[in-house]
Image (cartoon, rainbow, N blue to C red):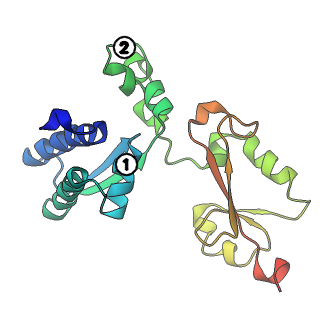
Amino acid sequence: MESEQSSNYRELNNLLLAIEESVGGGLLTGGELFFFTDNTTAESGFHRGTTTSRSLFQLILRMQMLQMHHDLSIHVLHVAGKRMQAQGTDGLSWGCLDGGVLAGSSMLSFVPLHLSAFACDPNLQDWVASWMCNDPVTWLTPFDWYTLGHTALSCILFEKNCDFVVTIPLGSSPWPHHHFEPLLLGIYFPLTRHRP
C-alpha cells in the first residue's frame, strides 16, 4: 500500500506517474527532461542505477525503461530545499501562492545551470585570486579545458583529477546564502611545478 511507503517513494512515484502520463500522451517522446529534486535518495539511486530500497529500485527501473523505450533523456539533479522554497514549489503544497514563480519570477532564474560560479557571484573571482600568491592564473571556461587547461601553469577549473576539493560552506563571505548550495572548489597542481 502506497500510504505505508516512505516519503522518498511517494514523491518520486507521483512525479513518475506524471512523466508516464506525458509519455503516454506523446508529449515527451524523443525529448529531454530535467528533473530537479531535493530527494537525495532518489537522485543518488537514479545515478547509481540501484538502491537498497526495493520499492525505490522499482521506480528507478521504471524511469530507466521510459528512457529506453521512448527515446527520452532524463536528467535527475539535486537542488536544495531552500531553493525549492524560494522558487515556490514547496509552498504550493500548503497553499502559499505568492512566492517565486507564482509571484512572477522566471523559473529559469532558480536553476542557473548555464552560469559558472564566477558568473553567479562576481566577488568569488577576487576571493580566489587573493590567495593565489600572485601566480599568473588562467581562468578557464569549459571551452578552454581541452586546450589552455593542458598548457597553462596555474588554472582555475573543476574536474575529476583535481588534487584536492574544498567545500565552501553556504553563507560564508565568498559564497552567500542566496546561492542555496555550497560551492565545490577543485585545486590541481601541474606536474611540472609542484610535484617531483
The label nearer to you, 1 versus 2, is 1
Q: Residue type at mark 1? A: Thr
Q: Position of residue 68 (x, y in %)?
A: 18, 64
Q: Which residue is mark 1?
A: 41
Query: Residue at 73% of width from left, 44% of height from top?
Result: 124
Name the amino acid type tagged 2: Cys
* Residue extending furthest toward the bottom: 196
Disc 2 crowd rating (10 Å Cα; few below 14, some 14-19, many 20+) is few
Q: Residues within 10 Å of mark 1 (few under 14, many from 20)?
A: some
Relative vertical location of residue 150 with respect to residue 20 in this rendering, above or below: below
Residue, disc 2: 96
Q: Residue furthest right?
A: 134
Residue 101 percent location from the top left of the image: 40, 24
Could you tell me which quadrant the C terminus lies in? bottom right
Which tag, 1 or 2, sits closer to the chain's start?
A: 1
Side of 112 relative to 146 (left or right): left
